[in-house]
Image (cartoon, rainbow, N blue to C red):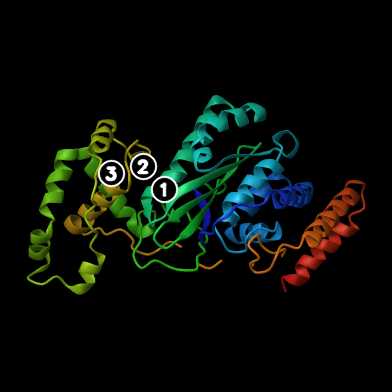
């Protein structure tokens, strides 16, 4: 599975005012009408799954140039922008409680797009799995609170979800794309953007974590009793005897901190289900960060198969922002941009694509 990137943004308070939301929807429709007219619905998914393009979109729409609202408000606006019957695109999920309603909203989209029951089931499974990967397989300190899925009539999808780190007051955004399917649990990123790297992040999706993932599944298949015994054996006295009288500094830096809570009931359920791979293990209800961290700890210290410790996150500003950063929203500019795009689209529909071509040439000039 191809996940396309991650962005980190500071948490800003406040809500987008109604006058701004109204104009964001109008401008958003103009932008995406042009894209769909020129390139088709699939291009929308490709662009939304690009964290850089998404960041630019939120700025162009007039929201904060650099805050968590670039995700939550922009995706809320896109729910209103796209009409499944007109655009062949639907947005489900959202922030907080709405994120947890995603599995309930997918069947309705499936009815509109005439998906089979299997197709709908696969989309629901995908929604659950990408959330589990970014919340459990990657332990970067960001707990998901926003999950949006953009579904195309042809069955392709994109996921934009966001997590919060209450300590640093930052939010991190994760992008997924269904094209180029390979694996949900190995190297799903094609580009990750952030302002600040974390020193130590447990990344079970990294290529170098493959052996650790495999051992984790094998341990689950052997049962909770074996895991309990191994965890008891690798407490401090065992670590000293394992590495000698004094543990090398470079080793202690890498040693995982023992998880405070392990859901042993979930471990027992997983044992009964006998998952065949790490993807199936993640989908077991109750398998959370504590269980995965414990399995990685055993894998590293007993079998010498450490997981990746590198933060899988790189860097990611139009019309201004609601909190006057970097400058106040310019309503006149927003409406002018909407009018230009609308006129270009209308002219294109009657065969006159000169304005649309002019916009393309402008884009090429700006990209030089």
Q: Residue at x 44, y 41 (%)?
A: 129
Q: Which mark is residue 133?
A: 1
Q: Secondary structure at mark 3?
A: helix
Q: Earlier in the sequence, mark 1 or mark 2?
A: 1
Say which quarter of the image contains residue 168. Answer: bottom left
Q: Which circle, 2 or 3, is nearer the viewer?
A: 2
- The answer to the question of whether label 2 and label 3 lie on touching residues, with beta carbons closer than 8 A, is no
In this rendering, position of residue 46 left or right of residue 259? right
In the rendered picture of this protein, how many numbered marks are placed on residues? 3
Q: Position of residue 262 (x, y in %)?
A: 24, 44
Q: How far apart are labels 1 and 3 at the CA level?
A: 15 Å
Give the residue at mark 2.
282
- The answer to the question of whether label 1 and label 3 lie on touching residues, with beta carbons closer than 8 A, is no
Question: How many C-alpha atoms fall within 10 Å of the one at disc 2: few (<14), some, or many (≥20)?
Answer: many
Q: Secondary structure at mark 2?
A: helix
Q: Residue at x 73, y 48 (%)?
A: 22
Say which quarter of the image contains residue 365. Answer: bottom right
Give the residue at mark 3.
217
Q: Position of residue 247 (x, y in %)?
A: 14, 70
- The answer to the question of whether label 1 and label 2 lie on touching residues, with beta carbons closer than 8 A, is yes
In this rendering, position of residue 201 left or right of residue 313? left
Q: Which mark is residue 305?
A: none
Question: How many C-alpha atoms fall within 10 Å of the one at disc 1: few (<14), some, or many (≥20)?
Answer: many
From where the camera sits, is residue 182 visible? no
Q: Residue at x 58, y 53 (%)?
A: 71
Q: Residue at x 7, y 71 (%)?
A: 245
Q: How far apart are labels 2 and 3 at the CA level?
A: 10 Å
When the figure is inspected, residue 85 is found, relative to residue 355, above or below; the finding is above
Q: How far apart are labels 1 and 2 at the CA level?
A: 7 Å
Viewer-nearest residue: 232 or 214: 232
């Amino acid at each position: 599975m191809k996940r396309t990137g991650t962005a980190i943004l500071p948490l800003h308070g406040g809500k987008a005012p109604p006058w701004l939301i109204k104009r964001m929807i109008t401008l958003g429709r103009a932008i995406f009408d042009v894209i769909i007219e020129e390139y088709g619905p699939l291009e929308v998914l490709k662009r939304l799954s690009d964290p850089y393009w998404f960041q630019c979109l939120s700025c162009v729409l007039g929201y904060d140039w650099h805050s968590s609202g670039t995700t939550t408000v922009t995706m809320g606006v896109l729910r209103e922008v796209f009409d499944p019957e007109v655009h062949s695109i639907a947005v489900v999920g959202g922030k907080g409680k709405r994120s947890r309603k995603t599995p309930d909203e997918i069947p309705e989209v499936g009815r509109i797009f005439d998906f089979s029951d299997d197709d709908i089931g696969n989309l629901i499974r995908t929604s659950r799995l990408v959330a589990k990967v970014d919340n459990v397989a990657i332990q970067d300190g960001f707990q998901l609170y926003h999950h949006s899925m953009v579904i195309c009539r042809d069955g392709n999808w994109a996921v934009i979800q966001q997590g919060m780190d209450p300590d640093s007051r930052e939010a991190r955004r994760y992008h997924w794309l269904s094209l180029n399917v390979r694996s949900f649990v190995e190297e799903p990123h094609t580009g990750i953007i952030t302002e600040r790297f974390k020193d130590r992040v447990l990344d079970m999706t990294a290529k170098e974590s493959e052996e650790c993932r495999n051992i984790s599944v094998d341990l689950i298949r052997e049962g909770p009793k074996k895991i309990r015994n191994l965890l008891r054996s690798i407490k401090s006295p065992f670590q000293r005897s394992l590495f000698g009288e004094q543990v090398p500094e470079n080793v202690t830096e890498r040693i995982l901190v023992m998880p405070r809570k392990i859901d042993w009931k979930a471990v027992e359920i997983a044992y009964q289900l006998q998952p065949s791979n790490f993807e199936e293990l993640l989908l077991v209800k109750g398998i959370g960060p504590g269980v995965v961290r414990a399995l990685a700890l055993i894998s590293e210290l007993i079998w010498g198969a450490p997981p990746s410790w590198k933060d899988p996150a790189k860097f990611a500003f139009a019309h201004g922002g609601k909190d006057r950063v970097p400058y106040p929203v310019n309503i006149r500019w927003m409406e002018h941009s909407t009018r230009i795009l609308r006129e270009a689209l209308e002219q294109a529909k009657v065969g006159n694509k000169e304005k649309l071509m002019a916009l393309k040439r402008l884009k090429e000039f700006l990209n030089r």
